Image: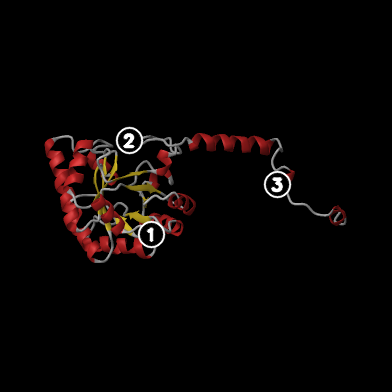
Amino acid sequence: MKNTVLTFAKAKKEKTKVSMLTAYDYSTAKLINDAGINSILVGDSLGNVMLGYEDTISVTMEDMIHHTKAVSRGAKDALVVADMPFMSYQTSVYDAVVNAGRLMKEGRANAVKLEGGREVCPQIKAIVEAGIPVCAHIGLTPQSINALGGNKVQGKTEAAARKLLEDALAVQEAGAFAVVIEAVPEKLAALITEKLDIVTIGIGAGNGCDGQVLVYQDMLGMFSDFTPRFVKKYASLGELMTAAFQQYDEEVKSAAFPAAEHTYKMDDDVIEKLY
């Protein structure tokens, strides 16, 4: 069964958890989909884990559309949510609706995600009114990393915590069907989850959220540039991949690969006529 925004609403009502992972290509999306994950986020984190940027700011609309197209082909049941990249929605409500529409029409996403609280509510409202589901994102917002002064936990003071709660209520009022809460103290995220009627998806926000999201390369040990504290490594595929690549390199150079079972045959009399 295809996961939709109604799946998320039902999960909130029935107090059941929802799962989300990132993906950026067809093969990975298909594996994640077949595992039963509720939603796939085509995150602008692709800037880090796929394109090698130091941050997400350099990611373009063309990047997001390209990768979302691939994921959408592999995710038959999972709800595909595409990140709106930096400056694709901050400039105006008009730009926000146009670019959200491109992610849906060209990328074949099922929903879009954008960062921010009250300041982006006009964009959220307009996008939703255009018939496009929106997932909000509060707390640590990577596109604002320069303004925030780095990857820091958000909402630790009373004023900051109150602002996050107000932002969460505002994006819900604007029409978001879910909100990602990133790098926020567990108790605050749990309070926000209790106050909201929409699903909260935590990443570094504790177990009190309605669901969780991780970057798949992080949870599989495939990305080693940095590992946030909130990441649990479910496998060490990076080490296995490196070992396999090294074995391949050795076998190619020693002529152990390809072996007889990896090659095609032909009659000797045919090849002899060519000499």
**x%, y% of residue 260?**
74, 44
Q: Nearer the viewer, mark 3 or mark 1?
A: 1
Mark 3: which amino acid?
A: His
| Marks 2 and 1 in Cβ contact (< 8 Å) | no
Q: Distance between the residues labelled 2 and 3?
A: 43 Å
Residue 2 numbered mark, or none: 1
The residue to which callout 3 is attached is: 262
Mark 1, other Cα within 10 Å: few <14 / some 14–19 / many ≥20: few
Label 3 SS: helix
Mark 2, other Cα within 10 Å: few <14 / some 14–19 / many ≥20: few
Q: Can residue 52 be seen in this view?
A: no
Mark 2: which amino acid?
A: Phe
Disc 2 or 1, which lies upstream in sequence?
Answer: 1
**x%, y% of residue 56?**
34, 46
Q: Nearer the viewer, mark 2 or mark 1?
A: 1
Disc 3 or 1, which lies upstream in sequence?
Answer: 1
Q: Can residue 109 be seen in this view?
A: yes
Query: Image quadrant of residue 49?
Result: top left
- From the image, which quarter does the N terminus lie in? bottom left
The residue to which callout 2 is attached is: 230
**How is the protein colored in the picture?**
secondary structure
**x%, y% of residue 122?**
18, 59
Mark 1: which amino acid?
A: Lys
**x%, y% of residue 46?**
40, 47
The residue depicted at 22 percent of the width and 65 percent of the height is 129
- The residue lying furthest to the front in this view is 14
Task: Give left or right: position of 240 versus 61.
Answer: right
Label 2 SS: loop
Task: Give left or right: position of 14 versus 72.
Answer: left
The residue depicted at 41 percent of the width and 39 percent of the height is 219
